């Protein structure tokens, strides 16, 4: 780090002038105060020193350099002075790790950065070297995440990222150091009548016809998201009240398991589709985006509608990427304020339809065929439990 003084130049302006501290230099006109400059928050800033002689200024600059070096490594000056080269400071390990991962997807890099900085911040300076991160440290991080109310899946993902960091730094079996939260297999849960009534009432109230037709179609047809995306008018048989699901080579659409099928639609949906056909927004596709292209945002639009309708549960939390390309940052949000509620999923329409088929006595082999499942076992897992209210008369009769 160089030392400077302030000198007037020939034009009478004050300038910082670098002091040449090499041997045998003439320093006759060196007058305090002395200055140095260093980077602070991405800017180069000047600092005036207390030193009144050049030798004192040299000593002061050395102290500052040591302090900055310690800061960069996340250590105290004393720890830096102990200087055990075999111990890797945690802060440095994280920076190195993030640098290694820089070519991953921006979303992944942002997530790694958020999690590792959260982990580091959580240690509040008590853990400064990688070799100090043992089972108790991981467990306390886990407890912190639990206290913050994060979902088991999120906690598991964050612990795994810290474990990857340890693994990269030679810690064997890092994932065994902490007991990972168990994640329940997702059990099929259809929408309740109340949920769907509330959604469609909101769409009616707001005159959101297009949105209503879209999600009535998801519900009535049981089709998968991409199957709805590529559903075309030619697939419909208005007389029989069915839709044919099949691959479309020209647009690269294939059906899961390559099994084409014909699915019956409820009569009120067929009627609504007939009406829609008269004023069809696109000659081929049943549903298109506002710009007349294939609709790719069925889910995001559903989640936004649910938020506006006040139908989010209020308990979901996640991290989202905010900001423009250069200023991306991760922010923690809840479904009270953002369209991230886990309750609202396109797949639940499909589960709802399947469960209602079952409840109304449709043979399970038909349901399997209509859902396009290869095995009956998949269909069995798929069907939701019928609610107690719906089963009340049967419970009482049993
Ligand atoms: Zn929610």
Image (cartoon, rainbow, N blue to C red):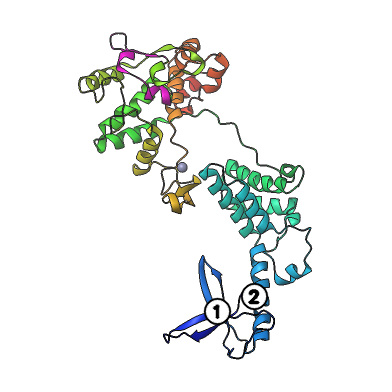
Where residue 165 sits: x, y (%)? 67, 48
Whether pointer 1 and pointer 2 mark residues with C-beta atoms closer than 8 Å, the reply is yes
* Foreground of the two, 331 or 87: 87
Q: Is residue 356 left or right of residue 240?
A: right
* Foreground of the two, 105 or 290: 105
**Figure check: 215 above or below 40:** above
Answer whether residue 121 is magenta in the image: no
**Figure check: 25 above or below 247:** below
How far is mark 1 from mark 2, CA to CA? 11 Å
Quadrant (top left/top right/bottom left/bottom right) for the N terminus: bottom right
* Foreground of the two, 266 or 232: 232
**Figure check: 138 above or below 6:** above
Is residue 324 in view? Answer: yes
Residue visible at 39% across and 41% down? 311
Is residue 248 in view? Answer: no
Secondary structure beneath label 2: helix
Residue on which disc 1 sits: 47
Answer whether residue 244 is magenta in the image: yes
Secondary structure beneath label 1: strand
Number of other residues with Cα within 10 Å of mark 1, as a class: few under 14, some 14 to 19, many 20 or more? few
The residue segment tinted magenta is 225-246
Residue on which disc 2 sits: 64
Where residue 66 sits: x, y (%)? 68, 72
Beta carbon of the mark 2 residue lies under 8 A of ligand 1: no
Question: Which tag, 1 or 2, sits closer to the chain's start?
Answer: 1
Where residue 360 sits: x, y (%)? 42, 16
- The answer to which image quadrant residue 28 occupies is bottom right
């Amino acid at each position: 780090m160089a030392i400077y003084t302030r000198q007037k130049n020939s034009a009478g302006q004050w300038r910082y002038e670098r002091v040449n501290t090499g041997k045998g230099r003439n320093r006759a006109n060196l007058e305090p105060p002395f200055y140095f400059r260093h980077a602070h928050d991405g800017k180069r800033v000047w600092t005036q020193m207390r030193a009144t002689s050049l030798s004192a200024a040299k000593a002061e600059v050395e102290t500052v350099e040591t302090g900055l070096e310690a800061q960069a490594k996340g250590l105290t000056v004393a720890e830096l002075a102990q200087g055990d080269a075999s111990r890797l400071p945690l802060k440095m390990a994280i920076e190195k790790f993030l640098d290694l991962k820089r070519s991953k997807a921006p979303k992944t890099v942002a997530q790694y950065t958020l999690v590792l900085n959260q982990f580091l911040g959580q240690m509040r300076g008590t853990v400064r070297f990688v070799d100090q991160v043992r089972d108790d440290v991981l467990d306390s991080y886990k407890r912190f995440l639990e206290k913050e109310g994060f979902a088991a899946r999120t906690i598991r993902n964050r612990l795994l990222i810290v474990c990857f960091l340890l693994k990269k730094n030679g810690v064997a079996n890092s994932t065994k150091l902490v007991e990972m939260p168990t994640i329940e297999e997702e059990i099929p849960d259809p929408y309740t009548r109340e949920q769907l009534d509330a959604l469609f009432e909101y769409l009616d109230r707001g005159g959101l016809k297009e949105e209503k037709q879209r999600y009535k179609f998801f519900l009535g047809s049981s089709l998968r998201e991409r199957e709805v995306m590529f559903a075309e008018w030619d697939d419909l048989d208005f007389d029989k009240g069915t839709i044919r699901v099949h691959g479309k080579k020209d647009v690269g659409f294939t059906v899961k398991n390559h099994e084409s099928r014909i699915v019956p639609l409820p009569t009120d949906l067929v009627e609504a589709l007939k009406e829609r056909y008269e004023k069809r927004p696109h000659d081929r596709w049943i549903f298109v985006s506002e710009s007349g292209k294939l609709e790719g945002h069925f889910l995001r639009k559903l989640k936004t509608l649910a938020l506006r309708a006040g139908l989010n549960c209020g308990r979901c939390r996640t991290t989202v990427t905010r900001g423009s390309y250069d200023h991306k940052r991760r922010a923690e949000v809840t479904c009270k304020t953002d369209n991230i509620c886990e309750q609202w999923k396109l797949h639940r329409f499909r589960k709802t339809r399947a469960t209602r088929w079952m409840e109304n006595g449709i043979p399970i082999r038909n349901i399997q065929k209509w859902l396009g499942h290869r095995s009956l076992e998949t269909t069995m897992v798929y069907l939701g439990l019928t609610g107690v209210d719906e089963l009340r008369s049967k419970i009482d009769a049993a």
